[in-house]
Amino acid sequence: MEKIIVQEHFEGQWLQLTLKDGKGNIIDLQMMSELMQLLEEFKFRPEIKVLTIEGDGKNFSFGASVEEHKKEMAADMLKNFHKLFYKFLDVSIPTIAKVSGYCLGGGMELALICNYIFADKTAKFGQPEINLSVFAPPASIILPEKIGLSRAEELLLSGETISAEEAHRIGIVNKLFDTKDILNEETTKFIEKVFLSKSAAALRYAVKASRVKFSHVLRNFLPSLENLYLIDLMEGHDANEGIQAFLEKRKPVWKNQ
């Protein structure tokens, strides 16, 4: 079953990507692979001016698969997840994440790599990885770049879930709308006004230019965080206990190791 649904608008100038994997739209290896393959294809379609990414149903995404965070699968999962972020940088097509409902963990990181985040008031954002005794490598780099270190650390160290209004106030969300219907309508108007009259080639160069520092930071620091996660963190007790306890729906027993 395909986990990314693609719809084309305005003769292929706008491509709408929908994450489709049940209630939580969990980002697993299959979904990552499909998304990377699509992005590679889009790179060679010069007419594309904007991509939107949204979740099927009421939620954007509950995050990456916790099952695939287990020690024996963590390296494959994390390396592929990070390749996805590099692919977004390579393609450089303007992207808008359209968020309703929960946008958590890897789902929030996917939204953060987009150029814009538009949300309705049902949206809730959070990086809850710390509650499982792990951390979020892409968010640890992207959040400070987008909203500043102080606010980023509040989210990364607390694991707190915040409202759409709060996310808008601190700069995670670019535009906030009352309902999902209005979000859809206003996104279409925004795309027509901002992107369709412009050169697709110029837009891609503008994305590369505006992200020159961001891209350098992500490419240079994400590999070191990947190593910190896989070589150090996952060799300890608590990260493995946190993931196992979540899967078994029980309270974790920490050894502080």
Image: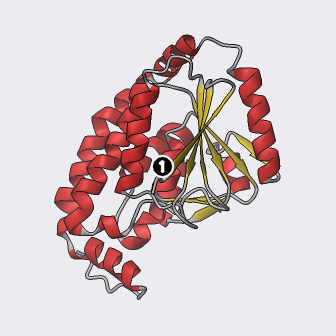
Vertical arrangement, residue 34 with respect to residue 123, above or below:
above
Q: Image quarter for residue 218?
A: top left
Give the quarter of the image for residue 161: bottom right
SS under mark 1: helix
Q: Where is residue 81 in the image (x, y as percent from the top left)?
A: 35, 48
Q: Does the image show residue 149?
A: no
Residue type, mark 1 in image: Glu
Residue closest to the far front:
1
- Against 107, residue 115 (above or below) is above
Residue 224 rendering spot, x and y as whole percentages? 24, 44
71 displayed left or right of 122: left
Q: Which residue is drawn at 63% across and 60% down?
A: 59
Residue 23 visible here: yes
Query: Quarter holding the C terminus?
Result: bottom left
Q: Which quadrant of the rendered structure holds the N terminus? A: bottom left
Vertical position of residue 164 compared to residue 201: above or below: below
Q: Residue at x 39, y 72 (%)?
A: 132
Q: Position of residue 55 (x, y in %)?
A: 60, 53
Q: How is the image coloured?
A: secondary structure
- The percent position of residue 169, horizontal first and vertical second, equals 70, 47
Identify the residue shown where x is 53% and y is 12%: 201
Question: Could you say which is closer to the camera, residue 129 or residue 111?
Answer: 111
Mark 1 — residue?
A: 109
Front residue of this view, candidates 245 and 189: 189
